[in-house]
Amino acid sequence: MPLGQRAGDKSESRYCGMEVLDFPAGEELPAVLSQSLSSAFDFLLAPLVDPGYRPAPGAVLPVAASDLVLSPSQWSSHIVGKISEWIDLDSEDEQLRLDSEVTLKQEIAWASHLSLQACVLPPPKRSSCANYARVVNHILQGLTNMQLWLRIPLEKSEPMDEEHDEAKNNSNMTVTVDSWVWWNSFRLLCEHSSQLCVALDVLSTLPSMNSLGRWFGEPVRAAILQTNAFLTNSRGYPCLSKRHQMLLTGFFNHSVQVIISGRSNHNISQVGLLSGDENHTEDTSVRHALGPYLEYIAYIYQRMDPLPEQERFEINYRDFLQSPLQPLMDNLEAQTYETFEKDTVKYSQYQRAIAKALVDRVSDDEVSTIKTVLMVVGAGRGPLVRASLQAAEETGRKLKVYAVEKNPNAVITLHSLIKLEGWESLVTIISSDMRCWDAPEKADILVSELLGSFGDNELSPECLDGAQRFLKPDGISIPSSYTSFIEPITASKLHNDIKAHKDIAHFETAYVVKLHRVARLAPTQKVFTFDHPNTSSNPSNQRYTKLQFEIPEDTGSCLVHGFAGYFDAVLYKDVHLGIEPNTATPNMFSWFPIFFPLRKPIHVPSKSPIEVHFWRCCGSTKVWYEWAVTAPSPSPIHNSNGRSYWVGL
């Protein structure tokens, strides 16, 4: 049963599991599962094999239960396998190491036989885990549908096992080990396998929020929440610290499901669902020792704000790689126009900007005598024409509109719109590429909607430079300027999706993506700015910039899979629109961020800056970007000479 019906959320974070601590032999497993499901848990994290087992010639694997005690759908839907915790593939003891390898392969084979969706691997017992990773990598190459979740404690902890004494002997300082480093080492040794994921053990103490934030870009499937991480409220019920609550909410937002683990530390005779206030309960009889913890998790989940309507609309696009539009080479389809035209926020911003420009252009004393010439270049099916005429009506200004559009199919719709609205005397439709048209008169205001996710990536500079000759010397361009921004991100899913193509070209393409499971590692910085009209003595649209990003010190080391790109545009004076996270226009959905991947992810040690270079290159028939990292380690220059990705002129 889901934690609750949070409007719009259909992710796996609605489901909550329980870790079985004792080995459930024979008929115990069906009984434990039945009790847990009746107590509102959704699945079990359960041992598959007797923890006392060691391989021996002719020995039969002592499994928890025959495959017949549960139905195939119960095995696959309600059981996550827990691999034996004694397994140590990097032990100095050769026999233990060999027994561990045999047993790990046997247990995974048994889990595959049961058609389990996932198994949880025990955490590395030391920071050097090359042999463990090697064996897991062998197994991953033979798996088809099952995932392996590596269990990692969510902490910056003392070194493991024998490394603890060695570290203390070598230093008088307190030595800590960042568990993210263990995961990163393991994942790199396994070649970023898409079937290798993470199960995080959430303990009573947490690292800094910046350190925790790294995990949102990793393939975390489950947060194993220990009962000893819970506090006790004034009525004796379990609750979590504010930091734990924030972390849990972050996990829910990133489709991570919770597994409750441990013995009950709260002896409560009566417990009920929490509602409204975490201290308020409606009494019902106890059904499960961990029930109070589940109910508190449900309370946190249900207290979250419902997903906004825009997020629900975009949910199917999350982390889905889309190639950017080729607006000059290709004519957009009706469905694409229709999607963009539904963005009422964008057009209301344009209308505000046009209204302000009209008022500045024509004083109240001149409204009856002056008619403003406005050109919509790239008119599409007419939403900017409508916004312009509504702005004129709102301000009482007279308007003469030229609607210039190169797509002959959109021009048909434009003619229908003009006739339907009775705008024949106000609007002249021009079926032409704006760069080729000779205007019969100069415009007071030039309006365009040519922006891409990175501002200039749909060739707005080239188009508006070509149309600039229509504008009077003192004319107004809407937009008047736009700036691109980037930030380094961890995006494990996007990296694996691109890697699946098995070529360099896909790693040298910029994608439009509704970013979701990503970790944003540093604040955004400006990349390129374009102003219109362009009065520069050097009108070239080629650009180059070098940026240095400082990762917050308490983050620790991290892995950069690429750069997220955004834009912010000044339409006119104080009217802007954009998707840069700090200034993003609320409830606008016409643009998703752009993602510039790296062919090989860059490991950034703690306190090391990231130095990145971006070029905007212009040729006679195309425009393209090139990008490269030079610190902390150099990458190749991506997309050299536009060999993989370009926008056609």
Image (cartoon, grey):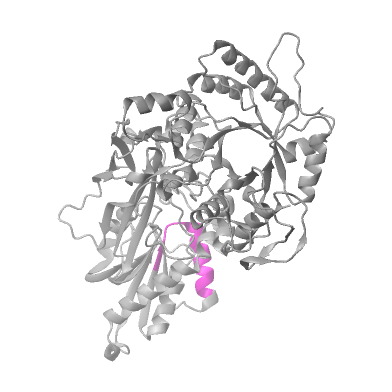
Q: Which quadrant of the figure has residue 362?
A: bottom left
- Secondary structure that dominates the magenta span: helix
Q: Is residue 204 visible?
A: yes
Q: Nearer the viewer, residue 351 or 315?
A: 315
Query: Residue 614: percent from the left, percent from the top?
Result: 29, 42
What's drawn in magenta, residue-wise? 403-419
Q: Nearer the viewer, residue 193 or 89?
A: 89
Q: Position of residue 477 (x, y in %)?
A: 29, 67
> Where is 40 relative to 392, above or below?
above
Residue 553 lies within the magenta run: no
Residue furthest to the top in view is: 57
Q: What residue do we see at 62% from left, 65% from top?
A: 279
Query: In percent of the image, x 37 and y 28: which residue is there?
Result: 168
- Residue 191 appears at what percent x and percent y? 49, 26
* Front residue of this view, candidates 341 and 51: 51
Q: As drawn, is 501 to the left or to the right of 178? A: right
Q: Is residue 95 above or below residue 633?
A: above
- Give the residue drawn at x 36%, y 83%: 398
Residue at the left extreme, as displayed: 537
* 404 drawn magenta: yes
Corner quadrant of residue 443: bottom left
| Residue 290: percent from left, percent from top | 69, 49
